[in-house]
Amino acid sequence: MRIYLPATAADLRAEAISARHAHAATQALARALPEEDEEGLEVSASLCAADASVMLLAEPGAEGLADRRLVIAADVDDQVVGELAVDEETLPGTVAVGAPVAWEEVAAILVDDPQAEEDVRAARTGDEEAFERAAEADLLWYDVVERQALAHELGV
């Protein structure tokens, strides 16, 4: 199953990506977005993960991390993923990843262009308008072999 893990620059230096909530093109997401094909559902899942990345940047201890959203796209065994029930705080397509994700399972790393930093910086402190502007920005695609160079670029 392809999952999109919200992340921060600090994750790029980890031995593996820790278990956490992620987003995927699930049946619940397909029911919520019936007009979307599989590709559209994948894009939606990645954008949800990008929004969740801002929330990670707003957590205590993340102050020194780069002001850029980061999403890790990985292909994991279906057995380590469980879809969460949709409620007021849980979006369709949200999944719980029950085990760390090895870098060998990573298909791509998606990250904001440097021009998005100002909006992401403001969004992580609660500026809703900046959050909306950041959500409109495209994420750049990096191959997993570029992980170390990207970590260096992002200051970790």
Image (cartoon, rainbow, N blue to C red):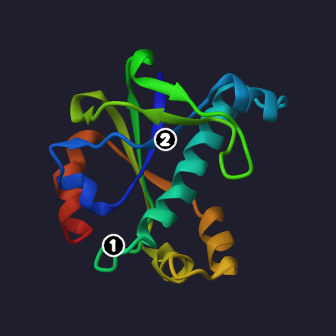
Can I make out residue 33 in this image? no
Q: How many labels does the image show?
A: 2
The residue carrying pointer 2 sits among few (fewer than 14), some (14 to 19) or many (20 or more) residues within 10 Å by Cα, namely many
Quarter the C terminus occupies: bottom left
Which of the pair 17/118 is nearer the observer? 17
Label annotation for residue 62? 1
Which of the pair 107/20 is nearer the observer? 20
Q: Distance between the residues labelled 2 and 1?
A: 19 Å
Q: Which residue is drawn at 41% across and 33% down?
A: 97
Left or right for 139, reference 66: right
Residue 92, compared with residue 80, is above or below; it is below
Left or right for 33, reference 142: right
Residue 49, compared with residue 43, is above or below; it is below
Q: What residue type is labelled 2?
A: Ala
Q: What element carries label 2?
A: strand
Q: Earlier in the sequence, mark 2 or mark 1?
A: 2
Residue 78, compared with residue 47, is above or below; it is above
Q: Residue at x 70, y 79 (%)?
A: 129
Residue 57, compared with residue 118, is above or below; it is above
Residue wearing tag 2: 22
Image coordinates of residue 1 in percent, x first then y, are 47, 21
